[in-house]
Amino acid sequence: MKRFATKTIHAGLEADPTTGAIMTPVYLTSTYVQEAPGKHKGYDYARTNHPTRQALEKNLAALEEGTYGLAFASGMAATSTVLLAFNAGDHVVCGKDVYGGTYRVFTKVFERFGVKFSFVNVHHLTEIRSAILPETKLLWIETPSNPLLHITDIPEAVEIAHKKKVLVAVDNTFATPALQNPLALGADFVVHSTTKYLGGHSDVVGGAVVTRNEEWYQKLKFLQNAVGAVPGPLDCFLVLRGIKTLSVRMERHCASAQRIAEFLSKHPEVERVYYPGLTSHPEHVIAKRQMRGYGGMVSFELKGDVQRALKMLSLTKIFSLAESLGGVESLIGHPASMTHASIPKEEREKAGLKDSLIRLSVGIEDVDDLIEDLDQAIKK
Ligand code: P1T
């Protein structure tokens, strides 16, 4: 079973041994009966593990071309658990353009415990090189980044980091394993918000980490159980069910986002479009090399002032104004006041994130309806 679409449906999964159920059952139980202390059928307590989570973890490991998967209660729980493996005094180099919640947990939580962070433009490899200090332990990359869709050359970044014994984590939420496998490109950890494309239907919050490194897997598994930010059986079931259609959904997300990015870039009222599938995107060549598609996220700026952008946000009829992304339905958002509001304005601006930026999560509706919807909202 080598090919991606087959793996989404079958990898790590088997019919339920007791009933033959083809869908992984949802075991709604917090504890498992033991024959004698420590003698059980592989499960003792549902924080430590449960069959639905185990199936999801195996599936995620296979999709990301990793060896070990770990599922979490949210993307932030996954991110935080990786960070909990580091110590006071350790230094992390992180992309400047990352999800606002990632910036927030790094600066407002982990800095309090003595972990140090430098936020740089990781898509400029020279900035990674000059940010690495003797105490740097981790390089954190989002590619494509949220919300400016910068692309970092993963193999090049890994080479720079590994030469200095720095581990590399890639948040692969925007690309998904359908489009990019950071572990195969040399990264040490892949992190996901499974809330997004993997779940795919805006009905579950979840996260994941995948690695090939046995020692790090054991470390993170210990922390997963010790800290306990774990997903329940129904959450795991929903993510598993979502993943089954990931391959076909991503094809549509990519095709429609490309059409929308091209439509916006020709629109007389649009100032700038950010989409790695456009040949004008500064890192298009890197995206073409390391990705199998450019994803479903498109950001853009309208001509005119911030008020114009704010007005447009409430004029779309199919795109719903909401946080999050990666669902079947199209969403429109305003990073400066929504997903990235926890980054101070001056830091946002240094990263190139303007208050007028609009972010689209292109869903799988008919793309002509989506284009007409954007056009009428822009013209009003
Ligand atoms: O929301 P949660 O499942 O905890 O995932 C956090 C997260 C991690 N990484 C990336 C790249 C993300 O985009 C997110 C969450 N992002 C949004 C909610 C958003 O609208 O951008």
Image (cartoon, rainbow, N blue to C red):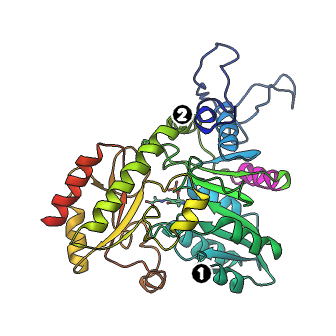
Instruction: Give the residue type that dot 1 points to.
Output: Val
Q: Which residue is mark 2?
A: 244
Q: Position of residue 320 (x, y in %)?
A: 28, 53
Which residue is at a point 70% across and 70% down the rendered structure image?
156
Which residue is at a point 56% across and 46% down the rendered structure image?
178
Q: Is residue 315 visible in this depiction of the protein? A: no
Label 2 sits on a secondary structure element that is loop
Q: Say how many tags the image has.
A: 2
Report the span colored magenta.
Answer: 216-227
On residue 120, the disc is 1
Residue 44 sits above or below residue 17 on the image: below
Task: Tell which of 378 and 54 is nearer to you.
Answer: 378
The reply to whether the residue tagged 2 has its Cβ within 8 angstroms of ligand 1 is no
Q: Earlier in the sequence, mark 2 or mark 1?
A: 1
46 magenta-colored: no
Q: Is residue 98 visible in this depiction of the protein? A: yes
> What is the magenta segment's predominant secondary structure?
helix
